[in-house]
Amino acid sequence: MDVDTRNMTPTNLIDKIVVPGDVVLDLTKMENQTIKLGSGLRQDCDCISVLQAGKLRLSKPNKYWVESSQKRYVPSLEDTVLGIVVEHRSDNFLVDIKAPNLAFLPVLAFEGGTRRNIPKFETGTLIYARVVKANGIMNPELSCTDASGKAAEFGQLKNGYMFETSTGLARMLLSSPTCPVLEALGKKISFETAVGFNGRVWVNASSPDDVILVSNAIMRSEFLSGTQQRIMAEKLLQRLEKV
């Protein structure tokens, strides 16, 4: 069924399926409001239109994006990503973030970064970073600091296990409140995760069995409801207890 979005408000399109060409926001009706655009959307004069099919999402108060389960990642400002270092140059690390182009990570884009303390990342090093520059033509740029210049949780991820997912699952894991599968697992075992909007997930725990369990639970959760995620997690935990 065709849906006319011209007279729709942003509120009643949230969590609805949208397709390329749909107009989801009329900026002339949103005076004195600053909005942030994520993947799948672009500005055409006074309108925000859709670039890819999926569900329109809103992260309050003002960030909109289109969520779709795809392997390819389109960088967007302020996205957190898991990257793999592929080359070290004099001024930048070249980093694979599953995007069409490699990303630049300046050697000084770290807390207290100077020429005297440049990180010694080898090829293959896994890092957690933030997208600070992104457009459809140039290489995206990363930083291993938050907006205030602090390292926060960014930097090299050591040990643990990294696997790839769709971008849709990654966004589900990063959603608020806590994703049901992570909440259910966290009540029984201790683990840590780093999730990138680019469809990469890193898991670390005190034992290999826990790492495997958490990773399997996450990979199985993409198309499950919240209740189904909790049931699945409980079954996996029961199997672990019997071992």
Image (cartoon, rainbow, N blue to C red):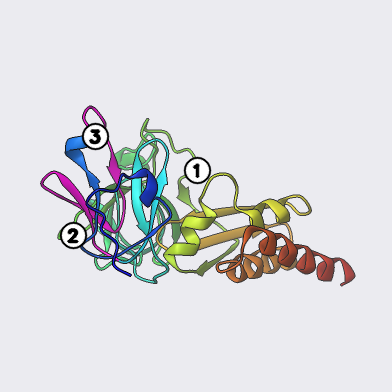
The quadrant in which the N terminus is found is: bottom left
Question: Quick check: can you spot residue 200?
Answer: no
Residue 30 — which label? 3
Q: What segment is highlighted magenta in the picture?
A: 31-52
The kind of residue tagged 1 is: Glu
**Residue 237 sits in quarter:** bottom right
Circle 2 or circle 3, nearest the eye: 3
Q: CA distance from mark 1 to mark 2?
A: 27 Å
The quadrant in which the C terminus is found is: bottom right
Bin the neighbour count of mark 1 within 10 Å (Cα to Cα): few under 14, some 14-19, many 20 and up: few
* Callout 1: SS: loop
| In magenta segment, residue 159 | no
Q: Earlier in the sequence, mark 1 or mark 3?
A: 3
**On screen, residue 197 above or below 113:** below
* Callout 2: SS: loop
Q: CA distance from mark 1 to mark 3?
A: 35 Å
| In magenta segment, residue 51 | yes
Q: CA distance from mark 2 to mark 3?
A: 26 Å
Bin the neighbour count of mark 3 within 10 Å (Cα to Cα): few under 14, some 14-19, many 20 and up: few
* Callout 3: SS: loop
Which residue occupies the foreground of this view, 14 or 84?
A: 14
Residue on which disc 1 sits: 153
Which residue occupies the foreground of this view, 126 or 36?
A: 36
Residue on which disc 2 sits: 136
The kind of residue tagged 2 is: Gly
- In percent of width and height, residue 103 lies at 28, 59
Residue located 78% across and 63% down the image: 234
